[in-house]
Amino acid sequence: MSRTSVLAIGVALVLSAASILALPVPSADTPVESLMLELRQTSPASAATAIRTLVGSAKIEIVGEHSLKIRDSTQNLSIAEDVIGMLEQPRTDADRPIFRSVPSDDTVIVAVSTDGLSPGDLMKALREETRSRKVVVDSATSTLMIRDSQKGVDAALEILEELKSLARK
């Protein structure tokens, strides 16, 4: 083996080790715990999507027809539990939006009725207009959920009202 080949292999090993070491590891002050959630209205797949999108939890296991198990930090489990509570609450257009503040990153999660709007069109419009990537629509409960800054959430709610107004005409 030539000296150049050995050097190239060495560099590759160093880069591989560096990328492994750069993986996020839970710190000592954020222990990983688990939470079992029972679902009444929402499918486990929809609930898992909402939690992945709005909370960022990746370790979600569908346990049965109506159950999820999540492994994450205590803080994220608390947010996930609130997200599911908001999603499971029946929504009508007359209902006011439900808000939940997330102090750790100054964001807000909101749940509001979609009032029969097309979930795909609604998500597309909100993502284009607000640039928010944390948007989930659950057709089973007719609920739109967004996690963004208060300003971003207010803009999304304004767009939603405009779309509802256009749909009524």
Image: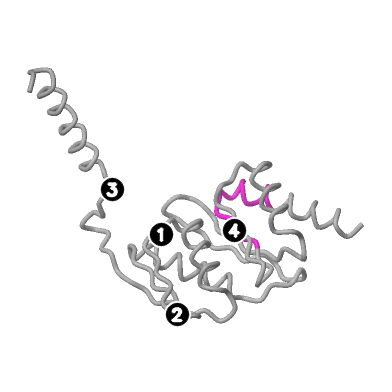
Point 24% across, 38% down: residue:
19
Question: Sequence-wise, which precedes: disc 3 or disc 2?
Answer: 3
Q: Secondary structure at mark 3?
A: loop
Q: Secondary structure at mark 2?
A: strand
Point 85% across, 57% down: residue:
167
Q: In the image, which is nearer the foreground, mark 2 or mark 4?
A: 2
Gap in Å between the C-alphas at discs 4 and 3? 26 Å
Q: In the image, which is nearer the foreground, mark 1 or mark 2?
A: 2
CB within 8 Å, label 2 to label 4: no
> Label 1 amino acid?
Ser
Q: Secondary structure at mark 1?
A: loop
Gap in Å between the C-alphas at discs 1 and 2? 19 Å
The residue that disc 1 covers is: 57
Left or right: residue 35 compared with residue 53: left
Which part of the image, by quadrant, shows the N terminus? Answer: top left
The residue that disc 2 covers is: 64
The one nearer the camera, 46 or 166, is 46
Gap in Å between the C-alphas at discs 3 and 2? 30 Å
Q: Which residues are magenta?
A: 144-157
- Bin the neighbour count of mark 2 within 10 Å (Cα to Cα): few under 14, some 14-19, many 20 and up: few
Gap in Å between the C-alphas at discs 1 and 3? 13 Å
Residue 124: x and y, percent?
Answer: 68, 48
The residue that disc 3 covers is: 24
Question: Sequence-wise, which precedes: disc 2 or disc 4?
Answer: 2
Q: Could you say which disc has been placed on residue 136 in the image?
A: 4
Q: Is residue 118 magenta?
A: no
Q: Secondary structure at mark 4?
A: strand
Q: In the image, which is nearer the foreground, mark 3 or mark 2?
A: 2
> Label 4 amino acid?
Val
CB within 8 Å, label 4 to label 3: no
